[in-house]
């Protein structure tokens, strides 16, 4: 498949800007734009624009991979070495797991370890903190956020902060706060916690607020912090430049499975491939359950592939809340720089620097969302989490493989580029998208429109729904009653803004696959570049175990409960085609003939697979029918032409033909099976009886059609039926059930009647050959039993029309072209 990103090599990278006009009540310098050097780093330009002596809040908006962490260490080092003023520097991280990393990095910059105090040491009386110049702490610790399971920060933490604040005030020390990865710490900046920062009001000198992925909520955090630095703000923003030599190769693997598990063939195949090519592997999973499922079965699925190459797999997951102190409790689950990691807790904050590395990211599968809250695991906060996850890989020449569901249909007219580029975008997107009908298209929305969107929702719905009640409360006498003030817009923005966007707008997180696909096509990811795509995973079937594999596919890939709910009210034919087309449209099917041979299963080309598929649908929809019930062990069995004809006759006879006068296809189908039954009954009525000394009484029909079996006035009806089964019936015309070979255009009418007569005997009777002992001594077919029509309520109805019209060319895609300078939709 031709990749479309070649058309977007110079397309600008969009990111969330921070601008002076975002802070109308603050003193904001003109924004400084800096450009990375030829290696992609910003430190030199950044340091030249930082004035250590100025009291203000510095906002550093820089892309992933531009050396922000190194710059943070350099800033701390500059204050440590400054002799004009004694400073106390706090580096505030969103995670305990990063504290050790910062400590090691600072020591590497020739800052003595004995001058550094680490968050994990709080409460250990043997380790002093008053004499330390650099403190590495967590944001929640700094703000006094006790987490989910406590009401107040521990006494040791409170004493630590109070002692330091008093010491700085008494000794006239100035305090510098460096907040790294602020996007991951925003939940700490609740109104009641902000008061903890005011203990530093008299000694605070500077705030540094750093991120590659700012959002609307972060602007409120900036305001809270800048208020402590006399409302002075400096904004430094780096240009987003692609440096191809620094980029990893990005591969998108679209997987339509309803559930991702350790035995998902495509994920296993991706893992197997990178391992066989000698790559070091880490797997970031959207959910803890999936990560555990991958790691625990060592002899099956993905885990089996991993344990072929690794003796240890690091399970990087934790049940603990992100606010809690996991430093000492959860060391075993931290990211390992040497082992293979599978888990959830290295989406951000970790730099993967392994050589020859493949980073596999498993996104949430389709259907994980709910009407008011998505269940996307570590990606529930939306698109920021995607950008941060991709940025974990830092080594040049690596690979990033994303497993993701097909995205929903896109409204191409909303795309922010010309129609020629929209066409290139659409041609690719139409191939990989989910072709299910969707009520709402994905629409491109500029990132910098988020504030406007939130404001509109807040004013018109969130607050707008309660204007009368708010006014009544404000005008009421409420002396000595608990405070009742409706939250202002900025607090709504801080507490709920990101969740609202991620849960209500497909482009901002409700359909993460659509966002990832858009960014991959338009080269929005700085650290990686699209190199390959797979969009039809392989499903492997084994000879004589097709039923068992279909059951697994139905349960794990199609979600049996949901599938029944969505399609069971459709006709049986509709259910069959929906299932069948999903199977062939979204997957590449292989048949494992033996250990070394895999044959591709093509539509209507593998008779055994097709009849097993029909039999499977019979078992799913009518489990109590005789051979359905006998297959509960998922053993393969033969769904024969006899079954197909008998089932269809039973339903054709019950249908009212007058209801289908406007449906020519269904009318022909009903008539064809009724005609088939007409001649079946004619043969039954023509059964003769005889007796012999050896057999006694017996019933028989002639082995060849008697004269006039199809008489002159029946000829048109006969020819119409034969034509239908030869040219229109999907299963007989495609030789799934052998029929049409004996009815070639070169065959005479007499030959056709003879062939048809033979098939009637084969399909509707149990017979044996017998040569009569009385003249004329001819071979006849002794009738041992007649195959009766089944109960129509127990068997597949392949006669009633499907609610949706399925053509033989079901795998069609929408087409787009430029007409008169405009992109238009041209359905095939």
Image (cartoon, grey):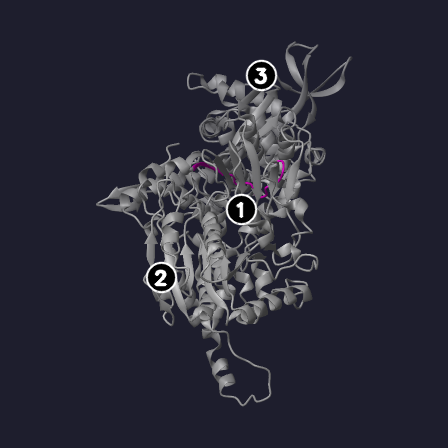
Q: Residue furthest front?
A: 83
**Label 3, label 2: how many angstroms apart (C-alpha)?**
91 Å
Q: Which of label 3 and label 2 is nearer to you? A: 2
Q: Which SS class for mark 3?
A: loop
**Label 2, label 1: how many angstroms apart (C-alpha)?**
31 Å
Q: Residues within 10 Å of mark 2 (few under 14, many from 20)?
A: some
In the image, taking residue 623 as reference, residue 652 lies left or right, namely left
Q: Pointer 1: what residue? A: 105
In the rendered image, residue 684, in percent from the top left (x then y), is placed at 63, 27
Please say whether residue 341 is visible from this viewpoint: yes
Q: Which residues are magenta?
A: 248-263
Q: Pointer 3: what residue? A: 704
Residue 19 - label = 2
Residue 3: name its quadrant: top left
In the rendered image, residue 421, in percent from the top left (x then y), is placed at 30, 43
- At 64% from the left and 11% from the top, the residue drawn is 778
Whether 138 is drawn above or below 484: the answer is above
Please say whether residue 408 is visible from this viewpoint: no
Q: Which SS class for mark 1?
A: helix
The mark that comes first in sequence, 2 or 1, is 2
- Magenta segment: does it hold 256? yes
In the image, taking residue 9 as reference, residue 320 lies left or right, namely right
Disc 3 and disc 1 in contact, CB within 8 angstroms:
no
Q: Quadrant of the C terminus?
A: top left
The mark that comes first in sequence, 3 or 2, is 2
In the rendered image, residue 40, in percent from the top left (x then y), is placed at 38, 43
């Amino acid at each position: 498949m031709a990749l479309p990103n070649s058309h977007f090599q110079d397309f600008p990278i969009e990111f969330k800007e921070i601008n002076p006009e975002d802070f109308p009540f603050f003193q904001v310098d003109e924004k400084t734009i800096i450009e990375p050097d030829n290696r992609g780093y910003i430190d030199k330009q950044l340091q030249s624009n930082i004035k250590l002596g100025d009291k203000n809040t510095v906002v550093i908006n820089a892309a992933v991979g531009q050396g922000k962490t190194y710059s943070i260490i350099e800033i701390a080092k500059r204050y440590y070495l400054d002799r004009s003023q004694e400073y106390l520097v706090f580096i505030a991280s969103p995670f305990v797991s990063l504290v050790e990393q910062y400590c090691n990095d600072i020591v590497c910059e020739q800052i003595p370890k004995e001058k550094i105090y680490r968050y994990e040491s709080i409460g250990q009386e043997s380790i002093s903190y008053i004499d330390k110049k650099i403190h590495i702490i967590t944001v929640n610790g700094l703000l006094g956020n006790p987490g989910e399971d406590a009401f107040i920060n521990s006494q040791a933490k409170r004493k630590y902060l109070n002692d330091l604040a008093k010491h700085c005030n008494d000794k006239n020390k100035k305090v510098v706060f460096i907040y790294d990865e602020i996007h991951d710490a925003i939940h700490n900046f609740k109104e009641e916690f902000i008061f903890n920062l005011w203990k530093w009001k008299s000694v605070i000198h500077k705030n540094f607020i750093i991120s590659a992925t700012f959002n609307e909520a972060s602007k409120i955090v900036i305001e809270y912090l800048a208020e402590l630095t006399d409302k002075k703000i400096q904004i430094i923003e780096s240009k987003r430049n692609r440096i191809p030599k620094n980029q990893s190769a990005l591969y998108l693997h679209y997987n339509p499975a309803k559930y991702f598990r350790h035995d998902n063939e495509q994920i296993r195949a991706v893992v197997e491939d990178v391992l066989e090519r000698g790559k070091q592997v880490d797997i970031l999973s959207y959910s803890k359950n999936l990560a555990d499922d991958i790691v625990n079965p060592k002899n099956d699925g993905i885990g089996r592939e991993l344990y072929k190459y690794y003796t240890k797999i690091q399970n990087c997951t934790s049940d603990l809340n992100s606010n809690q102190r996991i430093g000492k409790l959860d060391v075993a689950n931290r990211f390992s720089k040497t082992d293979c990691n599978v888990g959830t807790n290295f989406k951000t904050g970790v730099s993967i620097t392994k050589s020859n590395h493949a980073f596999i990211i498993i996104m949430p599968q389709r259907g994980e969302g709910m009407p008011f809250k998505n269940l996307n695991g570590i990606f529930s906060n939306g698109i920021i989490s995607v950008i941060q996850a991709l940025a974990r890989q830092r080594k040049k020449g690596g690979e990033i493989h994303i497993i993701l569901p097909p995205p929903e249909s896109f409204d191409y007219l909303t795309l922010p580029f010309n129609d020629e580029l929209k066409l290139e975008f659409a041609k690719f997107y139409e191939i990989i998208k989910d072709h299910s009908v969707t009520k709402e298209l994905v629409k491109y929305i500029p990132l910098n429109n988020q504030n406007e969107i939130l404001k509109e929702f807040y004013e018109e719905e969130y607050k707008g729904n309660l204007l009368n009640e708010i006014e009544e409360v404000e005008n009421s006498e409420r002396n000595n009653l608990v405070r009742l003030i409706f939250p202002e817009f900025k607090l709504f923005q801080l507490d709920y803004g990101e969740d609202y966007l991620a849960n209500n707008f497909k482009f901002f997180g409700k359909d993460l696959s659509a966002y990832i696909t858009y960014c991959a096509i338009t080269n929005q990811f700085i650290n990686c570049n699209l190199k390959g795509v797979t969009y039809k995973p392989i499903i492997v079937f084994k000879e004589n175990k097709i039923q068992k594999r279909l059951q697994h596919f139905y349960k794990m890939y199609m979600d049996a409960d949901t599938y029944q709910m969505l399609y069971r009210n459709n006709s049986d034919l509709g259910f069959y085609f929906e299932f069948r087309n999903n199977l062939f449209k979204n997957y590449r099917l292989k048949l494992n003939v033996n250990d070394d041979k895999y044959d591709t299963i093509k539509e209507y080309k593998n008779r055994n697979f097709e009849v097993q598929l029909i039999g499977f649908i019979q078992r799913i929809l009518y489990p109590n029918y005789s051979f359905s019930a006998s297959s509960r062990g998922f053993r393969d069995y033969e769904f024969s032409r006899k079954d197909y004809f008998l089932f269809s006759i039973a339903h054709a006879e019950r249908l009212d033909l007058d209801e289908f006068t406007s449906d020519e296809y269904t009318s022909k189908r009903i008539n064809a099976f009724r005609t088939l039954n007409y001649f079946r009954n004619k043969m039954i009525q023509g059964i003769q009886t005889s007796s012999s000394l050896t057999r006694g009484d017996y019933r028989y029909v002639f082995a060849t059609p008697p004269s006039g079996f199809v008489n002159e006035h029946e000829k048109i009806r006969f020819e119409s039926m034969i034509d239908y089964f030869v040219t229109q019936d999907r299963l007989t015309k495609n030789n799934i059930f052998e029929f049409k070979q004996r009815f070639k255009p070169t065959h005479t009418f007499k030959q056709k009647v003879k062939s048809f007569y033979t098939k009637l005997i084969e399909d509707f009777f149990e017979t044996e050959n017998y040569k009569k002992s009385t003249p004329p001594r001819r071979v006849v077919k002794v009738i041992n039993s007649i195959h009766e029509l089944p109960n129509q309520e127990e068997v597949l109805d392949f006669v009633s029309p499907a609610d949706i019209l399925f053509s033989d060319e079901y795998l069609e895609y929408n087409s787009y072209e430029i007409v008169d300078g405009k992109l238009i939709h041209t359905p095939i």
